[in-house]
Amino acid sequence: MITMAIRVCVTGATGWAGAAVTRQILASTEFALTGAVARQQAGNDIGAALGLAPAGVLIANSVEEALRTPTDVLIDFTRHDAVKAHTLAALTRGVRVVIGTSGLTAADYAEIGQVATERGLGVIAAGNFSITAALAKRFALMAARYVPSWELLDYAHSEKADAPSGTVRELAEEIGRVARPHVEVPIEEIHGDAATRGATIEGTQVHSLRLPGYVIAFEAIFGLPDERLTIRHDAGAGARPYVAGTLLATRKVMEMTGLARGLDRLLFED
């Protein structure tokens, strides 16, 4: 039996993560690159733009332009203020979506999930497509079932515009569906400036640091009397850790309908 390659368009194809994913797709026989979007490189061959042999795919200026070529899956690694429009445009054209861009809210995802379900298409979104980050998230969700108090710390470089990161927002929203933490002194009863206790996301206090010297990291800190559990994930400076998870999602999105958030959902059957 001949298996057809999954036809993929990557938006943000020359960016930090998008370029790494695009290179892997071009080297693969399982996937076929049918489109690429990168406004500053529009009109150039994507292979040449990435320092490779010409690929025969010209970079488009917009998602709408790129999706004129028949496509199965759109992979988005762009900006928080563009990804929702890209996703809805793809779904309208019958194209499934893998979202690797952070910054969307729970309300955004609810709308995307509704459209995907109505269209009979799949969308997989992850704040972090690293396998080890997905494991750290799953361990934190497990810990929340047994330890009643926790807070989240979010670290990133000073140029990162969205706060918290998509990884930590996703974790805070999902951990809120597992349990709500015990807070000894309610935030509204804080003496002084309550903002110093961080933002409350689905009941969890989240603290975001944006400083030079950091790449991306997060900590879920759980506390009990006389003991503490810290679950931490640190990302390096390269995009390689995100490639395998993105391509796993690209395979899985072909088999599903509706929205799935988090790479860990693809790794664990429960």
Image (tube, rainbow, N blue to C red):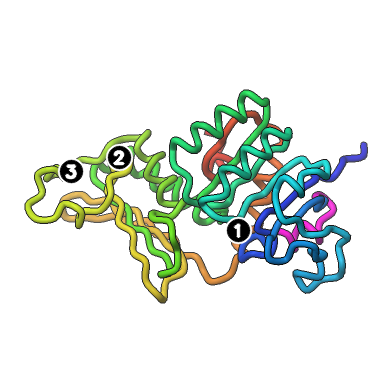
Task: Determine the main secondary structure of the stretch shown in magenta.
Answer: helix
- At a point 37% along the width and 59% down the height, the residue shown is 154
Which residue has dot 3 on it?
183
Residue 20 seen in render: no
- Quadrant containing the N terminus is top right
Kind of residue sitting beneath label 3: Val
- The range drawn in magenta is 19-31
Find residue 116 and report its horizontal and vertical position in percent. Answer: 62, 30
Q: Quadrant of residue 177?
A: top left
Residue situated furthest left in the rendering:
191
Which residue has dot 2 on it?
146
Find residue 206 and report its horizontal and vertical position in percent. Answer: 30, 52
Q: Is residue 23 magenta?
A: yes
Label 3 SS: loop
Label 1 SS: helix
Label 1 to label 3: alpha-carbon separation: 35 Å
The residue closer to the viewer here, 72 or 151, is 72
Mark 1 or 2: in front is 1
Label 2 to label 3: alpha-carbon separation: 15 Å
Find residue 165 and report its horizontal and vertical position in percent. Answer: 43, 55
Residue situated furthest top in the rendering:
118
Find residue 188 and report its horizontal and vertical position in percent. Answer: 13, 43
- At a point 79% along the width and 42% down the height, the residue shown is 71
Label 2 SS: loop
Which residue has dot 1 on it?
242
Q: Which mark is residue 33?
A: none
Q: Is residue 217 above or below residue 123?
A: below
Q: Is residue 57 above or below residue 125?
A: below
Q: Is residue 49 magenta?
A: no
Kind of residue sitting beneath label 1: Tyr
